Image (tube, rainbow, N blue to C red):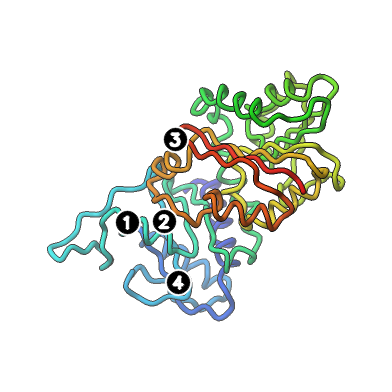
């Protein structure tokens, strides 16, 4: 490993160690045999160095206090070839449905597609409040993708423009693009508020915010490096928030939506958008579509209602996701 990979592994393993509840005795690592063995070995070594006497196992049939699932391909890995008994190398069934179920049940999901750059991608609610993993891991995931993001997703710009137009953002108002990425929504947002309005581009990843520099300059948008969970803005100081792909990255949906509500005036708007529908996005990542995920209609209505918003539009089409909420 080079120095950057070694540092990334140390960061991720320290973050994972911080998520383990006090008294944890056994951690299960589930994934392809070679990568599960590699990961288990490195986790064992790191925990020992931190003074945590935890047994790390790759036996999916073993009981464990915390389960870690390794994603090893962008669209989901192929299931391992079963033996004569229909079982894979660790004793668990390796059909695609079984893989998806194990990932859904896992306490922690690690992106290990690039073995030199592991990233914590999801933490179950019972562990999510622990440790300082969120900022470090979010930045690690997006930092290495910032330079090529528009090359991969640049054809989404018309969808962003259509979403902003549909939102009906007040002309002359203050609008914040929370999680702005490379700034694909900034030009449409400027058109929506007009030259008398204010556009703020906010992201937690420095590399993404730097990649948004050209788009922000054209749109006359201020760029702000900040965490969506702690916005550096006064209560009720903005008229609208545009958030593309943000909600699924928040470790606590309701708490995140409460913070967004704090900075919006009564009657202001929250636009939740993704240029792919939930089903298409799940398929892209090799995951099953779950009725319990944050953007499913039931959970989203509950979380917006509990955080000061009234959900007025919910539209989960195959080609894009669009939801609109109003600040109560």
Mark 2 to mark 1 CA distance (whole Å): 8 Å
Closest to the observer: 148 or 162? 162
Mark 4: few/some/many CA within 10 Å (<14, 14-19, 20+): many
Q: Secondary structure at mark 2?
A: strand
Counting from the top left corner in percent of width and height, residue 40 is at 41, 65
The secondary element bearing badge 1 is classed as loop
- Mark 4 = which residue? 27
* Dot placed on the residue nearer the N-terminal end, 4 or 1: 4
Q: Vertically, is 279 above or below 17?
A: above
Q: State if disc 1 and disc 2 touch (CB < 8 Å).
A: yes
Residue ID at (58%, 62%): 14
Residue 33 figure quarter: bottom left
Q: Which residue is mark 2?
A: 70
- Name the residue at 55% across, 56% down: 12
Q: In the image, residue 102 lies at what x, y percent?
A: 38, 62
Instruction: Assess whether mark 3 and mark 4 are in contact (beta carbons under 8 angstroms).
Output: no
Image marks 3 and 2: residues in contact by CB distance under 8 Å: no
Q: Position of residue 306 (x, y in %)?
A: 69, 58
Image depth: mark 4 or mark 3 in front: 3
Q: Secondary structure at mark 3?
A: loop
Q: Which mark is residue 318?
A: 3
Residues 52 and 218: in front is: 218
Residue 32 shows which numbered tag? Answer: 1
Mark closer to the observer (3, 1)? 3
């Amino acid at each position: 490993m080079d120095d950057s990979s070694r540092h990334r592994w140390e960061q991720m393993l320290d973050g994972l160690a911080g998520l383990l509840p006090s008294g944890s005795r056994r951690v299960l690592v589930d994934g392809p045999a070679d990568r599960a063995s590699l990961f288990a070995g490195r986790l064992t070594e790191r925990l020992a160095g931190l003074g945590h006497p935890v047994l790390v196992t790759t036996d999916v049939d073993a009981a464990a206090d915390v389960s870690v699932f390794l994603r090893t391909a962008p669209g989901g890995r192929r299931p391992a070839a079963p033996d004569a008994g229909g079982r894979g190398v660790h004793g668990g069934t390796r059909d695609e449905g079984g893989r998806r179920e194990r990932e859904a049940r896992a306490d922690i999901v690690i992106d290990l597609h690039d073995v030199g750059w592991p990233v914590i991608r999801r933490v179950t609610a019972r562990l999510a409040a622990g440790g300082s993993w969120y900022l470090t891991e979010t930045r690690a995931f997006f930092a290495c993708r910032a330079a090529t993001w528009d090359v991969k997703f640049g054809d989404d710009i018309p969808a962003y423009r259509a979403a902003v137009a549909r939102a009906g953002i007040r002309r002359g108002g203050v609008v914040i693009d929370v999680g702005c990425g490379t700034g694909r929504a900034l030009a449409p947002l400027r058109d929506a508020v007009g030259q008398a309005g204010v556009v703020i581009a906010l992201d937690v990843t420095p590399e993404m915010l730097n990649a948004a520099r050209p788009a922000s300059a054209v749109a006359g948008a201020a760029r702000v490096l900040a965490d969506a969970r702690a916005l550096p803005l006064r209560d009720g100081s903005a008229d609208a928030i545009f958030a593309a792909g943000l909600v699924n990255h928040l470790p606590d949906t309701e708490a995140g939506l409460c913070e967004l509500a704090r900075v919006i005036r009564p009657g202001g708007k929250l636009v939740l958008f993704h240029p792919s529908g939930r089903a298409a996005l799940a398929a892209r990542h090799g995951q099953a579509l779950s009725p319990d995920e944050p953007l499913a209609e039931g959970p989203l209505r509950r979380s917006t209602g509990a955080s000061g918003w009234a959900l007025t539009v919910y539209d989960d089409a195959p080609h894009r996701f669009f939801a609109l909420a109003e600040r109560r």
